[in-house]
Image (cartoon, rainbow, N blue to C red):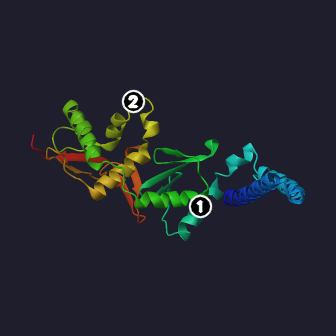
Amino acid sequence: MVSFEQACSDTERAAEAARKSAGAVVSQARALAKAAQTGNVASIKRCREKLNEALTALRQEVSNAGSCWPFSDEEEQLLFGAQYTDAIKTFADAKGLRIQEQDELLISYPSIVRILPAERAVRVDKKRVLTARPSYLVDLLLANQKKSSGFPPQRFLESLYSVYTDIVDRSSSDPLASGSGSVVPLARIYKLMTALPGAARDYDRSDFARDLYILDSNGPHRTRNGATVSFPSSTGTRRRSRDLFSFIGPEGDSAEYYGIRFSGSDG
């Protein structure tokens, strides 16, 4: 089966040929109009003949463009399989863009790409993207790296602190949350932050892990009232995978988060 990238390239060329052919029809129509304005009979006959020729050529180019896309509805879903991922990585390598795979996701820091075969689309972070041609998508990811991030780290930190303090206040008998400076599992934080219907779908575990990584790497690490955040590692008993949040950084470094602690504040 022809690749997605090749099919897009073939269709693009066919469409461009149809556009140029349409331009030739317009040009000949203008020439015919000019001949008619001056009453040049010989030119009228010559332009009419050329217009018919241009129209015949246009019909052929339109037919070519209309039949160029080779995939059925069923085959289109197959485009977004392993070959699609390989194509994205190939174009990324050629342009110096680092892409890592994690849990069926593509990580191109700071973007997270989810492939949606049923929708013939991808989701880049929270945005559904229909322009999914591999070469075009790589350019989009490169642009995302160069533009300023929309991630609000201070607001994210304050949200974590608000949920954390609520858990500590309500769980004083819990050995993991028995007062200021104690460790609270991030799984509990995430559960409360995505408690509203549909929230976990729009902000899934990978999004949360990515934001934790950015906050941990770049800060800020102190809330407005002076509490300092840290992310203690999982120790002691073996933790379940759903208790951990993992993310791959821009250099391929893997980070794993289990718990969060806030210590010290101005009250």
Is 43 placed above or below 193 here? below
Residue 158 in the image: x percent, y percent?
Answer: 24, 42
Label 2 environment density (alpha carbons within 10 Å; few <14, some 14–19, many ≥20): few
- Residue 65 on image: x %, y %: 77, 53
- Secondary structure found at label 2: loop
Q: Residue at x 24, y 34 (%)?
A: 167
Q: Quadrant of residue 200?
A: top left
What is the x, y in percent for residue 175? Answer: 22, 39
Between the residue at mark 2 and the residue at mark 1, the CA separation in whole angstroms equals: 37 Å
Dot 2 or dot 1, earlier in sequence: 1
Question: Mark 2 — residue?
Answer: 196
Q: Is residue 123 left or right of residue 31?
A: left
Of discs 2 and 1, which sits in the foreground?
1
Q: In the visual, does 60 lie left or right of 186?
A: right
Q: Quadrant of the C terminus?
A: top left
Q: Identify the image quadrant of the N terminus.
A: bottom right
Figure quadrant of residue 181: top left
For residue 161, say whether it is visible.
yes
Query: For this view, does 263 lie left or right of residue 48?
Result: left
Which amino acid, by three-letter code, is at mark 2?
Leu
Q: Which mark is residue 226?
A: none
Q: Nearer the viewer, residue 53 or 70?
A: 53
Closer-to-camera residue (249/136): 136
Question: How busy is the neighbourhood of tag 1: few (under 14 within 10 Å), some, or many (20 plus)?
Answer: some
Residue 240 visible in image:
no
Nearest the viewer among 233 and 47 is: 47
Instruction: Check the image and name the residue furthest to the left.
Output: 266
Q: Mark 1 sits on what residue?
A: 135
Classify residue 98 as left or right of residue 63.
Answer: left
Residue displayed at 78% across by 57% down: 31
Report x, y in % for residue 5.
66, 59
Amino acid marked by disc 1: Ser
